Amino acid sequence: MYLNEIKPKTKCRITKILGSGGIHSRLLDMGCVKGEEIEVIKVAPLGDPIDITVKGYHLTLRKNEAKNIEVETI
Amino acid sequence: MSQKEITIALAGNPNSGKTTIFNNITGARQHVGNYPGVTVEKKYGYINYKGYKINVVDLPGTYSLTAYSEDEVVARNYIINENPDIVVDIIDSSNLERNLYLATQFIELGVPLVLAFNMSDMTKTRGKKINIELLSKLLASPIVETVGHKNKGTKDLLDAAIKHIENKDREKIEIKYGEEVENELEKISKFIEDKKTLQERPGSRWIALKLLEQDKEIINKVKEETGEAYLEIEQEVNRSIKHLSNILRDNPATVIADARYGFIRGALTETYKETEIEKVSATDKIDGVLTNRIVGLPIFAVLMWLMFQFVFKVGAYPMDWIDIGFSKLGDLVSNAMPEGLIQSLIVDGIIGGVGGVIIFTPNIILLFLCIAILEDSGYMARVAFIMDRLMHKIGLHGKSFIPMLIGFGCTIPSYMGSRILENKKDRLITMHVNTFMSCGARLPVYILLAGAFFPQIAGNVIFSIYVIGIVVAILMAKLLRVTRFKGESAPFVMELPPYRIPTFKGVLLHTWERTWLYIKKAGTIILAVSILMWILFTFPMIGENYSQDYDAEIVSLEQSFKSNEITEEEYEEDLTEIEAMKGAEGLAYSAAGRMERFIEPIFKPLGFDWKLAVASISGIAAKEVVVSTMGTLYSIQEADEESESLRENIAREYNPLIGYNFMLFTLLYFPCMAGMAVFRREAGWKEMWFQIGYTLLLAWVVSLVVFQIGRLFI
């Protein structure tokens, strides 16, 4: 499962970060690493991007970017 | 007594309160410049403290030190090349884990490091406990608790920095990345050491680490330094990466990032305790409304409307005062000086030209005040969150929306406002299309022409011009994204920082900085261009070469008036007309007038005669000048956009197609010289010339097509 498929108010755990280059590195820098528990909080009014919490803060990313985060629901 | 000079580099995540601490340390003793070769802003300042002269450099706010962002490369290169005595990393203590990630990379660089745990008051009230002493030991860096917005801990921070610099036996630690990676690191380090390509700092281990992470910048640097020998290094690195990917089932970059977070977690499990689980935070409550699915957009629209009203309605008053002030100044100088060239240069050239720039200052101040509040409060990130879907569709970033909206008021602050975009390509595309958001100065031209040719439907005609501007902006943004600024658009992965009440001092400093840059930089260039424009419109002087003897006509007119042959009203009217004709002839004789006749063939296919061509060239100074130039050219003195006689003259001379076409042309070519001066400051000469060139070309092509096709129908 990938983060872009997760519904709001759902908690999940990161199992792998895909992609390469800029997006890969950016996700790692922002704290999206394997094993991290995250929660999808909401979707923006126009349907994209999404708002998640990771490491205790709010992060927003486009669904297209969220495809690079493989997760399992918990 | 000789003073010891030390340099502190201030680093930290965006929203960590770094700027506030920088302001606390340096006060007013700060300067803003650019890092060489890039548009990243460089802020620096100094303080004399306990016998030291402490230079403080404010590095760009970053989350990491990779080669993927210009800001991060700048920060990293500053540390490697300039070798500051110490790095002070500002940490938002309410978000330790992610903030410390940057710190681990300073540790890797081996640079002396002091950590400022900022906003430490917040963590205490939220029931979080940090064992500062132990954590400081584990990270081998002094930690100082600060509260930036209350100016607490600033002195302690400076004391700690000085003490750490003077400490000769600083402990050094290394972050370990796991046995497998360590083995490979050792091999690669040895390899580069053997090849004698090792830079003295930051050391071969760091270079090896970056090679494993496939850091483009460092790869290129090593390539440059080693020449042919690089092939062997590359082979060695690729072998390592393949080996690690096989056994760890993940690429080395991921494993290294994991290890950094592992190091942080390790240090924090021993030293950090959350005594109570936090309830719903204030930020979450505010966001429940401001980014709400249903009311989020309407609230945003209202806020933008209020900001627009504030900037341009409130700004109109001081603008009027400045306008009156400059014309009074002009009158004063006119009266105090004998009539002639020098007077004309000072009054028309310098006072008129510089006044035309200074008059925008109230807009700029108010706008940057709004932007500073939006940014410092944390709402700007929400704007990006709300608007990104729409803006992304046209190849832009969520944050592009604000500068584009501002463009409807004045293009100059919209160029400057584009700074909120961190990514260079996003910023440049936004700047290049901002000009099509039709600014306030273009409105008088539309009012004049729409009134002349479409008196019944003037409002709709003007509205259509605005809509065309928006459509052109969207098309150009898309076009630029796939051509000149091609490539991966920056990934949209952004922090939504907690809401904070902006500090008075921070907002004012922010506003003043930007405003001063505008006045200083734009002012000097504008002065030069104003003088140039004046020369072009004044020389060569017509002297005695008028086609008619206007002076004699005036004399005879005066006589007829004195002998009561004509009424005073008739006299005034005729006199104005004669003087206007004289002025128009003088203008046609000048370099600008001649140039226009010379380049008339360029404008002819658009349906413009030399008068319209001169008018559009004068619009380079500022678009509203087009109206007054047309007044001179059509021999109507004191013309404004509501002038009936000017409208009649224009309507007589051209058809509605040409009228509409001229409005289009005015909309599309670059806004004004003040705008271009700012554009150069923000993006450099090359981009400025590109903006000038492509908007002129676009204006020409669009007008050509409209005229040539339209001609077939009338």
Image (cartoon, rainbow, N blue to C red):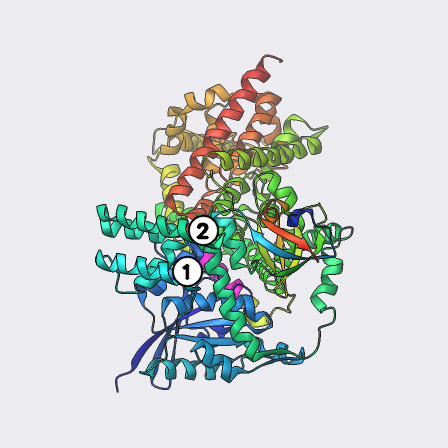
* Residue interval drawn in magenta: B509-518
Q: Is residue B361 above or below residue B630?
A: below
Residue situated in front as seen by the camera: B645 or B596: B596
Give the SS element for disc 1. helix
Type of amino acid under label 1? Glu
Q: Residues within 10 Å of mark 1 (few under 14, many from 20)?
A: few
Task: Say if residue B360 shows up in the picture.
Answer: no
Q: Seen in the image, is B176 located left or right of residue A71? A: left
Residue lying farthest to the front in this orientation: B247
Q: Seen in the image, is B594 located left or right of residue B568? A: left
Q: Are marks 2 and 1 in contact (CB under 8 Å)?
A: no
Q: Is residue B13 above or below residue A71?
A: below
Residue situated in front as seen by the camera: B248 or B316: B248
**Chain under label 1?**
B
Type of amino acid under label 2? Ser
Task: Say if residue B89 shows up in the picture.
Answer: yes
Q: Residue at x 23, y 51 (%)?
A: B226
Q: Quadrant of residue B529?
A: top left
The label shown at residue B245 is: 2
Rendered location of residue B349, percent (x, y): 41, 47
Give the SS element for disc 2. helix
**Chain under label 2?**
B
Q: Is residue B54 above or below residue A30?
A: below
Residue situated in front as seen by the camera: B332 or B433: B433
Rendered location of residue B622, percent (x, y): 50, 42
Which residue carries the number 1 mark? B180
Distance between mark 2 and mark 1 Cα atoms: 10 Å
Q: Residue at x 45, y 73 (%)?
A: B28
Q: Is residue B546 above or below residue A32?
A: above
